[in-house]
Image (spheres, helix red, strand yellow):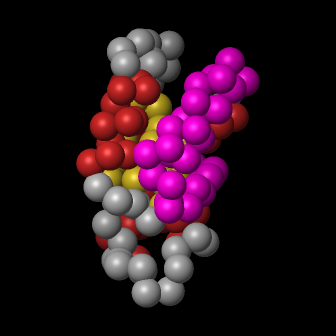
Amino acid sequence: MLVVGLDPEQFDQWDPGPVLSAIARGRARFAEVGVEADWCLVDLGADPEGAIRQALTREEYACVVIGGGIRTYEPLLEFFEKLINMIHRHAPTAAIAFDTTPEDCADAALRWLRPGTPGA
């Protein structure tokens, strides 16, 4: 699994602590269900597309989970579209799932794992 989201430490306007705690609980949930997951938390001010492309081509993923910060924030609509197309191009066999919080990333991925998928 690959989880793609925004790096909460890159936003000066708010305290990243609660989101980082939620990410830690999300990582623990993956471990709980026995699924390995890589996390790609991007900085929009750097090269987010390059970071995501690098993550997508690092290995073959059964599923890519896209975080709500990317999906639901209207100013990021074009970036979200680019992300969907990058997944389509670089991980064409990966399912795409959407979480509601960093804590339920594993559950979002599990909805799309096929029986027999490694780690499922």
What span is in magenta?
A: 74-102
Q: Is residue 105 above or below residue 58?
A: below
Quarter holding the N terminus is bottom left
Q: Is residue 61 above or below residue 6?
A: below
Q: Nearer the viewer, residue 13 or 99?
A: 99
**Furthest-right residue in view?**
74
Q: Is residue 97 magenta?
A: yes
The residue positioned 58% from the left and 56% from the top of the image is 96
Magenta: main secondary structure: helix
Q: Is residue 114 left or right of residue 16?
A: right
Q: Is residue 66 left or right of residue 50?
A: right
Q: Nearer the viewer, residue 7 or 45?
A: 45
On the image, the x and y values in percent for residue 80 come to 61, 32
On the image, the x and y values in percent for residue 32 come to 37, 75
Q: Is residue 79 above or below residue 55?
A: above
The residue positioned 35% from the left and 59% from the top of the image is 60
